[in-house]
Image (cartoon, rainbow, N blue to C red):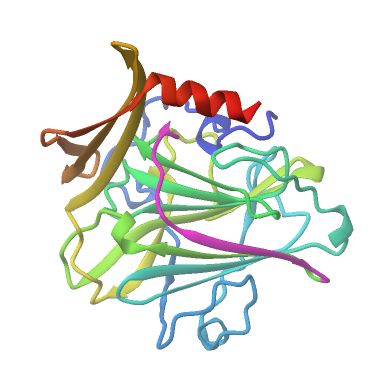
Amino acid sequence: MLLGLPLLAAVTLVSQSPDPRPPGNPADRPPPPKAVTATRAARPPVIDGRDADEVWRDATPVTDFQEWRPSEGGPPKLPTEAKIAYDAANLYIFVRAFDPHPDSIITVLARRDYFTPTDLIGVFIDPYHDRRTGFEFWVNPSGVKLDAQIYNDGNEDFAWDAVWDVATRIDSLGWTAEFRIPLSQLPYGRQRSQTFGFTIDRDIYRYSQRVSWPLFRQSHAGMVSQFGELNGLDNLEEPRRLEAAPYLVTKNVTQISNNTLGRTQDLTIGGDLKYRVAPNLKLDATINPPRSRRSFKRNDRSSSRVRGNSR
């Protein structure tokens, strides 16, 4: 096993041979995906890595995690529990990674978007529920974050960055990760009631074991198509298809002209616009109005005198 690699890269994508059994037989159909219902939060939880908030006492826990690497479908060495909640603007996930030896939890500090050789918890979301596209959000016990966009049921784009929060804690029971993912970062439909594809993965590094809910099967092709379902997402905010990001850039250039020391200052104001056409298709535009320029000059002899005094 190559630890520290992205989840999708760690899963072998295999082509499946045709099923010799006749179509139409109920035994031929895949079992329905596992599902969990999100709890509506009357008050948003404080993102501090603790499960003391009211919503976490009410949420239904997900506990039936299974090993998918190195063995498919084996029992986990350590139990894992997850709870999911939401409000009109955010998705909240609390994961308790039980560990009887908290001092043995492997973690390091690193820059963002680096797969650390440590314990990890990953949340995977397919907000369009198209079983082809999705997003992943990872964190290690030190709070190092990583996110990526998934397309074609198995390709990852780690250049994608979202705005989201997570808090982690190591305590006497193991470690926890509490996520707040703004729905503005996820594209989804306009239905009153939503169903997202959803999966949680845990890497127990010192045991070289990966566990997930629901079970990822290395013997099956694809990844997003194996996600479970997150139900009960009602009355969400209207999805944002248009994003605007203004920017301001300044530049100072010092130059000598006709024995005079001068400085030119450029000021540029613009913006980037993004419009989402489809789950994996965006139209990007950049607005660049004419830049403003100001010049400042001073006498070279005066500047020399200042330099001389500075010695």
Quarter holding the C terminus is: top right
Q: Is residue 51 left or right of residue 269?
A: right
In which quadrant of the rendered view does residue 1 lie?
top right
Boundaries of the magenta span: 155-172
Residue 159 inside the magenta-drawn segment:
yes
Identify the residue at image location x=69%, y=33%: 3
Q: Nearer the viewer, residue 306 or 243?
A: 306
Q: Quadrant of residue 250?
A: top left
- Which residue ends up furthest to the top in the rendered image? 258
301 shown above or below 67: above
Instruction: Residue 306 in the image: state x and y as whole percent.
Output: 52, 29
What residue is shown at x 61% (from left), y 72% (from top)? 48
- Give x and y (percent) for residue 263: 33, 27
**In this image, 53 relative to 294: left or right?**
right
In the rendered structure, does residue 135 fall within the stretch colored magenta? no
Residue 259 in view of the camera: yes
Q: Nearer the viewer, residue 107 or 196?
A: 107
